[in-house]
Amino acid sequence: MQASLLLGEQAPLFSARSTEGDFLFENFREKWLFLLFCHEAFDTIATTEIISLNRSIKFFSDYKCQPLIITSSSLFSNLAWIYSIYQQNGEQIDLPVLEDPTCKIFEAYQGSNHCRKNRFFFLIDPYNTIRWMCHYPSSIGLSIEEVLRTLSALQHSDQNNTLIPVNWRPGEKSFSETAFDRKTMISIGEKWFYPL
């Protein structure tokens, strides 16, 4: 049995055909990646997610992040899916939807259990490090707003070497790490553990 992927580990590399051409993981070294795993094309919840992601692409671009949707369906099923979305909603899906009919990518990211069909996603930084991952029920769509908030928080924390408090939004205050020794604690004063 394969060990679970953990935050801070290197993301498994892969290549695949997509609705926007061939995808090679190594070609995105300078960008963050948001990998959304959907078990199959034409899934009702996944359809709402792909439309929402497509409408939010500018915000992802602002954070130098490329969203990718990965399905266990074939390229031709994925193409039919995005064409169906276009026919029904007039929405042109510009995001790459990658095929994984052999489930090799799903297995590498430990989501190959088709019986449960849980949804899951990963945020991967430009150094190929897994920074956030989430598994969630198949009956509930993800929150694009929370994905963008967390992406922004991770980047802000990295750039400023700070901690991000609960419900933080871009532009709000973050703070330095708390004291880890008695002398630093005394020099900071009574707010050593609660810097807000």
Image (cartoon, rainbow, N blue to C red):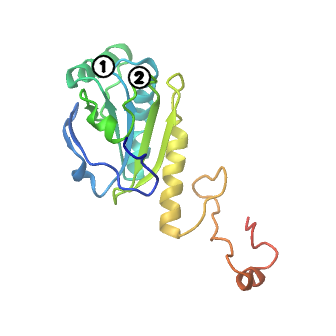
Q: Name the residue located 32 percent from the left edge and 41 percent from the top edge.
A: 108
Give the residue at mark 2. 47
Quarter of the image where one finds residue 15: top left
> The C terminus is located in which quarter?
bottom right
Asked whether, in this view, residue 156 is left or right of residue 177, the answer is left
Q: Name the residue located 45 percent from the left edge and 51 percent from the top edge.
A: 6
Asked whether, in this view, residue 75 is left or right of residue 153, the answer is left
Q: Residue 169: x, y in percent?
A: 60, 52
The mark that comes first in sequence, 1 or 2, is: 2
Give the residue at mark 1. 81
Asked whether, in this view, residue 115 is left or right of residue 173, the answer is left
Tell me whether the residue at label 1 lies in contact with that at label 2, contact meaning CB atoms closer than 8 angstroms. yes
Q: Nearer the viewer, residue 7 or 54?
A: 7
Q: Residue 181: x, y in percent?
A: 69, 80
Q: Is residue 194 above or below residue 1?
A: below
Q: Residue 31: x, y in percent?
A: 33, 54
Q: Nearer the viewer, residue 155 or 93?
A: 155
Q: Amino acid at mark 1?
A: Trp
Q: Is residue 27 above or below residue 185?
A: above
Q: Amino acid at mark 2?
A: Thr
